[in-house]
Amino acid sequence: MYRRVTVADFGVAALTTADAKAHLRVDTAHEDALIADYVDSATRYVEKVTGTALRPQTWTLTLDRFLGRRQPLPGGRVTAVSAVKYYDVSEALVTMPPADYVVSLGLTPAIVEAPNGWPGTQVREGAVQITYTVDGSDEPGLVEAVKLLVTHRYENRGVVSDRAQMVPVGFDDYIQMHAAAWYG
Protein backbone atom coordinates (compact mmCIF):
# COMPACT_ATOMS: atom_id res chain seq x y z
CA MET A 1 0.00 0.00 0.00
CA TYR A 2 1.47 3.29 -1.06
CA ARG A 3 0.66 6.33 1.05
CA ARG A 4 2.21 9.70 0.49
CA VAL A 5 1.14 13.05 1.78
CA THR A 6 2.30 16.19 0.02
CA VAL A 7 1.90 19.46 1.82
CA ALA A 8 1.60 23.10 0.81
CA ASP A 9 1.47 25.53 3.70
CA PHE A 10 -0.15 28.94 3.72
CA GLY A 11 2.91 30.74 5.11
CA VAL A 12 1.36 31.14 8.55
CA ALA A 13 3.74 30.33 11.40
CA ALA A 14 2.77 28.13 14.35
CA LEU A 15 5.06 30.33 16.41
CA THR A 16 5.86 33.86 15.33
CA THR A 17 9.38 35.23 15.35
CA ALA A 18 8.24 37.81 17.90
CA ASP A 19 6.93 35.09 20.21
CA ALA A 20 10.14 33.08 19.79
CA LYS A 21 12.23 36.16 20.57
CA ALA A 22 10.18 36.80 23.70
CA HIS A 23 10.67 33.19 24.75
CA LEU A 24 14.42 33.47 24.10
CA ARG A 25 14.56 36.89 25.81
CA VAL A 26 16.06 38.46 22.71
CA ASP A 27 15.20 42.14 22.29
CA THR A 28 17.29 43.12 19.27
CA ALA A 29 16.42 42.65 15.61
CA HIS A 30 19.83 41.63 14.28
CA GLU A 31 19.08 37.87 14.70
CA ASP A 32 15.50 37.88 13.45
CA ALA A 33 16.30 35.95 10.28
CA LEU A 34 18.21 33.30 12.21
CA ILE A 35 15.42 32.91 14.75
CA ALA A 36 12.81 32.75 11.97
CA ASP A 37 14.82 29.94 10.34
CA TYR A 38 14.99 28.07 13.66
CA VAL A 39 11.21 28.46 14.09
CA ASP A 40 10.54 27.19 10.57
CA SER A 41 12.84 24.17 10.84
CA ALA A 42 11.59 23.29 14.34
CA THR A 43 7.98 23.56 13.19
CA ARG A 44 8.63 21.32 10.18
CA TYR A 45 10.43 18.79 12.39
CA VAL A 46 7.59 18.63 14.94
CA GLU A 47 5.05 18.31 12.10
CA LYS A 48 7.06 15.47 10.57
CA VAL A 49 7.53 13.42 13.72
CA THR A 50 3.94 13.83 14.93
CA GLY A 51 2.16 13.77 11.57
CA THR A 52 0.20 16.81 12.76
CA ALA A 53 -0.01 20.18 11.02
CA LEU A 54 0.87 23.11 13.26
CA ARG A 55 -0.25 25.72 10.74
CA PRO A 56 -2.94 25.83 8.04
CA GLN A 57 -1.94 23.65 5.10
CA THR A 58 -3.29 21.87 2.05
CA TRP A 59 -2.52 18.15 2.08
CA THR A 60 -2.83 15.61 -0.74
CA LEU A 61 -3.05 12.01 0.41
CA THR A 62 -2.02 9.62 -2.36
CA LEU A 63 -3.00 5.94 -2.19
CA ASP A 64 -2.74 2.89 -4.41
CA ARG A 65 -6.46 2.26 -3.96
CA PHE A 66 -9.41 3.22 -1.80
CA LEU A 67 -9.21 1.57 1.62
CA GLY A 68 -12.62 0.14 2.36
CA ARG A 69 -15.58 2.47 2.75
CA ARG A 70 -13.94 4.86 5.21
CA GLN A 71 -10.67 6.64 4.49
CA PRO A 72 -9.02 8.43 7.44
CA LEU A 73 -7.26 11.70 6.65
CA PRO A 74 -4.03 12.25 8.59
CA GLY A 75 -2.68 15.61 9.63
CA GLY A 76 -4.86 16.97 12.38
CA ARG A 77 -8.06 18.97 12.27
CA VAL A 78 -9.40 18.83 8.69
CA THR A 79 -11.54 21.80 7.72
CA ALA A 80 -12.49 20.85 4.14
CA VAL A 81 -11.98 18.26 1.44
CA SER A 82 -11.50 19.99 -1.90
CA ALA A 83 -11.15 16.99 -4.22
CA VAL A 84 -11.23 13.22 -4.39
CA LYS A 85 -9.60 12.04 -7.61
CA TYR A 86 -8.79 8.58 -8.90
CA TYR A 87 -7.53 6.84 -12.00
CA ASP A 88 -10.37 4.69 -13.28
CA VAL A 89 -9.91 1.31 -14.95
CA SER A 90 -9.40 3.02 -18.34
CA GLU A 91 -6.54 5.12 -16.81
CA ALA A 92 -8.49 8.39 -16.95
CA LEU A 93 -8.09 10.76 -13.98
CA VAL A 94 -11.60 11.32 -12.64
CA THR A 95 -12.72 13.87 -10.02
CA MET A 96 -15.53 12.46 -7.92
CA PRO A 97 -18.58 14.68 -7.45
CA PRO A 98 -18.84 15.74 -3.79
CA ALA A 99 -22.34 14.21 -3.70
CA ASP A 100 -20.72 10.76 -4.05
CA TYR A 101 -18.81 10.95 -0.77
CA VAL A 102 -19.38 12.16 2.78
CA VAL A 103 -16.79 13.95 4.90
CA SER A 104 -16.91 13.70 8.69
CA LEU A 105 -14.94 16.76 9.79
CA GLY A 106 -15.72 16.47 13.50
CA LEU A 107 -13.59 13.36 13.92
CA THR A 108 -9.85 13.11 14.48
CA PRO A 109 -8.77 11.92 12.06
CA ALA A 110 -11.46 13.16 9.72
CA ILE A 111 -13.04 10.49 7.55
CA VAL A 112 -14.02 10.46 3.88
CA GLU A 113 -16.65 7.84 3.25
CA ALA A 114 -18.43 6.53 0.17
CA PRO A 115 -21.88 5.38 1.30
CA ASN A 116 -22.42 3.50 -1.96
CA GLY A 117 -18.83 2.22 -2.18
CA TRP A 118 -15.80 3.63 -3.94
CA PRO A 119 -15.44 3.27 -7.71
CA GLY A 120 -13.00 0.82 -9.25
CA THR A 121 -9.51 2.17 -9.78
CA GLN A 122 -6.60 1.44 -12.08
CA VAL A 123 -4.04 -0.87 -10.49
CA ARG A 124 -1.16 1.57 -10.11
CA GLU A 125 0.84 3.51 -7.59
CA GLY A 126 -0.98 6.69 -6.63
CA ALA A 127 -4.34 5.66 -8.07
CA VAL A 128 -6.22 7.79 -5.50
CA GLN A 129 -5.59 11.44 -4.57
CA ILE A 130 -7.52 13.15 -1.79
CA THR A 131 -6.83 16.87 -1.36
CA TYR A 132 -7.92 18.60 1.83
CA THR A 133 -7.21 21.55 4.10
CA VAL A 134 -5.84 21.07 7.59
CA ASP A 135 -6.15 23.81 10.17
CA GLY A 136 -3.10 24.30 12.35
CA SER A 137 -3.14 22.40 15.64
CA ASP A 138 -3.81 24.55 18.67
CA GLU A 139 -2.46 21.96 21.08
CA PRO A 140 -0.12 23.87 23.37
CA GLY A 141 2.22 20.92 23.89
CA LEU A 142 3.23 20.96 20.24
CA VAL A 143 3.99 24.68 20.25
CA GLU A 144 5.97 24.13 23.46
CA ALA A 145 7.97 21.43 21.66
CA VAL A 146 8.75 23.96 18.91
CA LYS A 147 9.84 26.50 21.54
CA LEU A 148 12.10 23.93 23.22
CA LEU A 149 13.73 23.02 19.93
CA VAL A 150 14.19 26.68 18.90
CA THR A 151 15.75 27.47 22.28
CA HIS A 152 18.04 24.46 22.07
CA ARG A 153 19.24 25.38 18.58
CA TYR A 154 19.67 29.04 19.47
CA GLU A 155 21.65 28.31 22.63
CA ASN A 156 23.78 25.53 21.10
CA ARG A 157 24.46 26.94 17.65
CA GLY A 158 28.20 27.01 18.18
CA VAL A 159 28.54 23.63 19.88
CA VAL A 160 30.86 21.23 18.08
CA SER A 161 30.85 18.09 20.15
CA ASP A 162 29.78 14.50 19.91
CA ARG A 163 28.19 14.93 23.32
CA ALA A 164 25.92 17.78 22.30
CA GLN A 165 22.34 16.71 22.85
CA MET A 166 20.33 16.27 19.65
CA VAL A 167 17.07 17.46 21.22
CA PRO A 168 16.43 19.27 24.48
CA VAL A 169 15.30 17.49 27.65
CA GLY A 170 11.51 17.26 27.69
CA PHE A 171 11.12 17.54 23.91
CA ASP A 172 10.43 13.82 23.47
CA ASP A 173 7.80 13.96 26.23
CA TYR A 174 5.81 16.58 24.31
CA ILE A 175 6.17 14.61 21.08
CA GLN A 176 5.09 11.31 22.64
CA MET A 177 1.95 12.96 24.07
CA HIS A 178 0.92 13.92 20.55
CA ALA A 179 2.39 11.11 18.47
CA ALA A 180 0.11 10.13 15.62
CA ALA A 181 0.07 7.25 13.20
CA TRP A 182 2.13 8.76 10.42
CA TYR A 183 1.53 7.86 6.82
CA GLY A 184 4.75 9.43 5.48
Image (cartoon, helix red, strand yellow):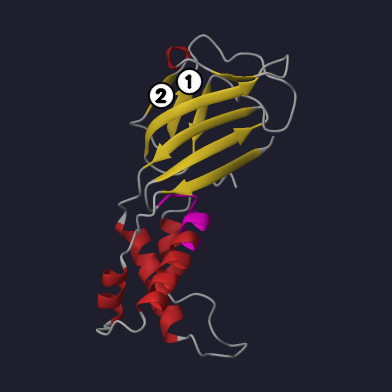
Q: Main secondary structure of the magenta part?
A: helix
Frontmost residue, 14 versus 163: 14
Quarter holding the N terminus is: top right
Would you say 153 lies left or right of 61 here?
left
Q: Mark 2 and 1 residues: CB-CB less than 8 Å, in contact?
A: yes
Location of residue 150 (image quadrant)? bottom left
Q: Which residue shows up at 72% across the image and 33% down it?
A: 125
Disc 2 secondary structure class: strand
Name the amino acid, label 1: Glu
Can residue 170 be seen here? no
- Picture coordinates of residue 94 (x, y %)? 59, 18
Tell me where residue 11 appears, x and y as whole percent. Answer: 39, 54
First reached walking from the N terminus: tag 2 or tag 1: 2
**Measuring 42% from the left and 77% from the top, which residue is drawn there?**
34
Q: Nearer the viewer, residue 65 or 16?
A: 16
Q: Quadrant of residue 104?
A: top left
Residue at 41% x, 38% y is 133
Marker disc for residue 103: 2
Q: List x then y, in percent, for residue 52.
A: 44, 49
Mark 2 crowd level (few <14, some 14–19, many ≥20, 10 Å Cα): many
Instruction: Report how far apart the C-alphas of labels 2 and 1 lie in the structure.
Output: 6 Å
**Pointer 1: residues within 10 angstroms few (<14), some, or many (20+)?**
many
Viewer-side residue, 131 vs 155? 131
Q: Is residue 50 highlighted in magenta?
A: yes
Q: Secondary structure at mark 1?
A: strand
The residue depicted at 24 percent of the width and 84 percent of the height is 27
* Residue 113: numbered disc: 1
Q: Is residue 91 highlighted in magenta?
A: no
Question: What span is colored magenta in the figure?
Answer: 45-53
